[in-house]
Image (cartoon, coloured by chain):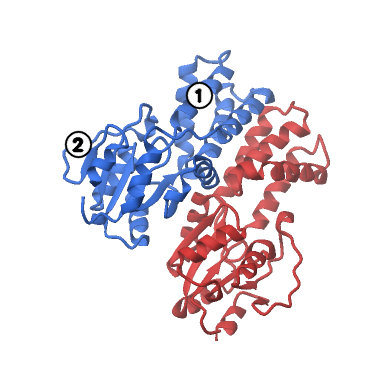
Chain colours: A red, B blue
Amino acid sequence: MKDLQVIAFDADDTLWVNEPFFREAEDAFCGLLEEYLPAHTTNRELFAVEMKNLPLYGYGIKAFTLSMVETLGRITEGRAPYRLVERTLAIGREMLEKPVVVLEGVAQTLEHAARSHRLVLATKGDLLDQERKLEKSGLADYFHHIEVMSDKGTANYRKLIAHLDCAPAHFMMVGNSVKSDVIPVLELGGHAVHVPFHTTWVHEEATFEADHPRFRRAETITDLLDYLA
Amino acid sequence: MKDLQVIAFDADDTLWVNEPFFREAEDAFCGLLEEYLPAHTTNRELFAVEMKNLPLYGYGIKAFTLSMVETLGRITEGRAPYRLVERTLAIGREMLEKPVVVLEGVAQTLEHAARSHRLVLATKGDLLDQERKLEKSGLADYFHHIEVMSDKGTANYRKLIAHLDCAPAHFMMVGNSVKSDVIPVLELGGHAVHVPFHTTWVHEEATFEADHPRFRRAETITDLLDYLA
């Protein structure tokens, strides 16, 4: 693909494992409340609290932990013993301390792509947490710029692309979320590659008609190298 | 001052009121625990928990709220009723919803400085929260770039200055914290202006010998205009 200058990569569930850790945490949290409610009901309540809090808290593990603590109160009608609060805080802390599991093919893909293109990381979540994961991943040196965004809508992508001094037509985004990584970038005139991951957060689910001239759906991230060739 | 290209401003307690809102929140939190401990002891315990959590949680209101929730457990020996947790979450939420109070002289100073220099905002804290405050402040248009940093040490300043395509000698930082806004920037060869604020978080306190060729201590932020003239 000629004229392509910058390739931006999503991080969570594109470069490394993330959503499965949230699912694990949700399971542990629902387990704490089993004597009050069945797990799927707790999970639904937690999701409702997360969505209510999203405009105020944003994304990331700290926001998620605060929403779990709030859900404790809802489900127990304000009678949760502090012991449950303590265990909920521990679930959040453990998430922040997880090792980083880099996905298959990622290091090889970045290494090749970095030879011919400027690579940037474009992610949302907690700033410190994303920096720490990048550090632990051993992938930091491939990236020319790290952008942690409060949300991945068109306005923030427009700012990022302008900031990179790059026309949208020379920009490509690679990620696992159709909603966050594909649709806004195509809307701005950029290229997008969807690399599906086996687990997607309900909030990120979106359907997308794959027939678009600047869009590709990859089977694995290494397919990117064929597109660039 | 000639050859100066970029002026970076700290945000909290430099452009707008911040620390007094944390103090108010601490008072409210200590008030919740009055039947357990005197306020100053609770406050000391909270600070200890915040410092313990800083490497994991970073800065900002969500981190602070999680530390308050944890402190509840410490002070009540794990027996805090959920009602206290609920009120603690409410203290955090109210902080996030505070109006932005721009400090005197700030708008005028930015307006003048922006005519001759590139202005950037360099702050730490929650990304979403800082973006929201900038939006509410009405000051966003003065800034060419917004940098939310996980911490304000020399490594992050070095990245920022490189990223701005600016030599340290052409860079000036303006802020209320000697530790975060002055010392690391002077160390890198940049200029720094300290604009003291009446309230400083203990963690940001530092002494600084004011006799340095690239350092100025301003009485108010408008003094900056005299330095630039």
Identify the residue at image location x=37%, y=51%: B119
> Which secondary structure, mark 2?
loop
Q: Chain of mark 1?
A: B
**What chain letter is assigned to the residue under label 2?**
B
- Marks 1 and 2 close (CB-CB < 8 Å): no
For the point 56% across and 62% down, which residue is it? A157
Please check whether the numbered discs 1 and 2 fall on a single chain.
Answer: yes
> Is B12 situated left or right of B89 in this image?
left
Side of A38 where A31 appears, left or right: left
Q: Residues within 10 Å of mark 2 (few under 14, many from 20)?
A: few
Q: Is residue A91 visible?
A: no
Q: Which one is nearer the viewer's eye here, B80 or B99?
A: B99
Residue A151 coordinates in the image, percent (x, y): 60, 54
Q: Quadrant of residue A140?
A: bottom left
- Residue at label 1? B24
Is residue B86 or residue B98 the one in the foreground? B98
- Residue drawn 46% across the image and 76% down it: A114
Q: Mark 1 belongs to which amino acid?
A: Glu
Tell me the quarter of the picture where residue A84 sits.
Answer: top right
Q: Position of residue A127 (x, y in %)?
A: 51, 51
Q: In the rendered image of this protein, does residue B159 appear above or below residue A222?
A: above
Q: Secondary structure at mark 1?
A: helix
Residue highlighted by disc 2 = B210
Q: Is residue A132 above or below residue A144?
A: above
Give the CA separation, mark 1 to mark 2. 31 Å
Residue A44 position (above or below residue A220): above
